[in-house]
Amino acid sequence: MQIYLDHGATTPAHPEVIDLMASVMRSQWGNPSSLHWWGERSTMAIERARLQVASLINADPEGIIFTSGGTESDNMAIVGIARQYCTPQHMIISSVEHSAVSLPAHYLERHGWEITRLSVNRQGQVDPAELARSLRPNTVLVSIITAQNEVGTIQPIEKLGQICRHANVLFHTDAVQAIGKIPINVQVLPIDLLSLSAHKFYGTQGIGALYINPLIAPLIANERSLIPLIQGGGQERGYRSGTQAVAAIAGLGLAAELAEGELIAESRRLANLRDRLYALLADIPELVPTGMRGNDRLPHHLSFYHQHIDGRRLVREMNFAGIAISSGSACSSGKSEPSSILLEMGYSPIESRNSIRLTLGKSNNETDIDWTAMVIHQILHRLA
Ligand SMILES: Cc1ncc(COP(=O)(O)O)c(C=O)c1O
C-alpha cells in the first residue's frame, strides 16, 4: 500500500488539468503576442485562466499576473516594491516566512534596508499589536505568510491587513499553502499583493501568479511602482516579460476553477480526516503536535515533533513503509539541522530537528488514515 501524505510539498496534477494542457499544447500553441489567429487562440486560453484564477480569490482579473510559481511571485512582491525606491527603506516580515520571502528580505538588508521580523507565539502566530508597534514612517511593505507551510498555522490576515491599510502601507501575503484550502476573498480581506502557486492545488509545477490589487495601481504608477524583475517583451502588462507558458497557465486556470468548486466540501472532508489521524495518534505521548488546532490551522495539515527521534529518520522509516511525509529539518553537511520555523516558535533545537509534517489531499481516505496511524505506532514501537 502506498500513501502520499505530502501534499504541502506538491500535489499531483488533476487528470482534467493534464488533459486540458495536452489539448492546449496540441491546438493552442501559438505565441500569445502574435496578432494572427494562432496567437489569438493562445491569448484566449490565457485570458480564460486569468478569469478563473481571479474568481478563486474574488479578484479583479486585471490584477492577476502569471509567474513561474510561488517563489517568483514572492520575489517580485518583495524586491519589485523595494526597487522602486532610490534609497533603502523599512520592510516588515514575520519570522516564520518561507525562504522565498525571507531570503529576498535578507538580500535587501544586505543592501541597507531595515527589516523587522515579527516574532510568533508557540503556535506560530504573529501578534497584530506588534505589527502596529513596528510600523515606521518609512515602512513601505509588510509581508506575512497566510498559512505557515511547516506547522499549518493560519495568521490573522484580516487584522494585519487592516493595520497596514490604516497606515497606508502595502500588504503582501504568501498564500501558496492556503489557496484552495481556505476561502480567500481579496475584496473583503485588505490584501494588496498575494502569491499563489498551481502545484499546491492540483495544477502543475512552474506556474503561479502574483495578484496586485488594481486599486493600488495609481500608487504604483506614481511613487510606489513595483519594478518588474524580468524585463523584455512587456508581456503580462509589463509586470512579467517572457512568452507566457500557455498550457501551464490554462492548467492553473482549470485547477483554480476546480478548487473553487469543491473548496468548502473538500476542506471539511480533509479536516475530518486530519482530526481522525490526530485522535489515532493521541496515545503516543512522545509525538507532540505543533502549531494551532482548530480553525486557525490548515484543514489538511498535521505537524508534530518526536521527543527522541530525528524527523528525517522518521521520514525515511515511513518511506520504507510506503508512506510519504516530510520533515521540517534540513540537511546541511550530512547533518540534520533544526527547523528554523520551530526554533522561532520557541522549541528547543532537538525538538525542532525532530519535527515532521503530514499533509492530506484528494486521494486520501479513512483507510489511508487508519493504516498510517497503525504504521506510525509500529515504527515508533520498534524504534523505542
Ligand atoms: C509558503 C510557500 N511559499 C512559497 C513556496 C514556493 O512556491 P513554488 O514551489 O511554486 O516556487 C512554497 C513551496 O513550498 C511555499 O510553501
Image: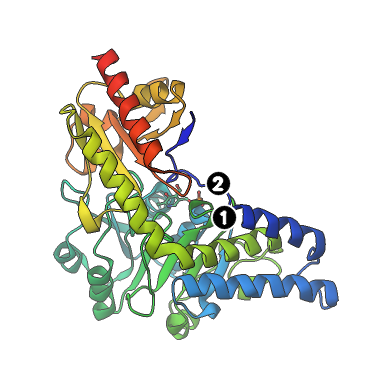
Q: Secondary structure at mark 2?
A: loop
Label 2: how many residues lie within 10 Å, few (<14), some (14-19) or many (20+)?
some
Image height of 205 relative to 371, above or below: below
Q: Which mark is residue 12?
A: 2
Quadrant of residue 268 in the image? bottom left
Residue 236, image x, y percentages: 62, 72
Question: Where the C terminus falls, by quadrant?
Answer: top left
Query: Of the residues shown, which amino acid type is indicated by label 2?
Result: Pro
Q: Are marks 1 and 2 in contact (CB under 8 Å)?
A: no
Residue 253, image x, y percentages: 59, 66
**Residue occupying the far front of the picture:** 367
Quadrant of residue 245 in the image? bottom right
Quadrant of residue 269 in the image? bottom left
Label 1: how many residues lie within 10 Å, few (<14), some (14-19) or many (20+)?
many
Residue 205, image x, y percentages: 58, 50
At horizontal 24% and vertical 32% (from top left) the residue drawn is 305
Viewer can see residue 136 = no
At horizontal 58% and vertical 73% (from top left) the residue drawn is 50
15 displayed left or right of 170:
right
Give the mark nearer the N terminus: 1 vs 2.
2
Q: Secondary structure at mark 1?
A: loop
355 displayed left or right of 88:
left
Q: Which mark is residue 203?
A: 1
168 displayed left or right of 216:
left
Depth check: 255 or 372 in front? 372
Viewer can see residue 163 = yes
202 displayed left or right of 290:
right
Q: Which mark is residue 145?
A: none
At horizontal 35% and vertical 49% (from top left) the residue drawn is 300
Residue 122, image x, y percentages: 16, 46
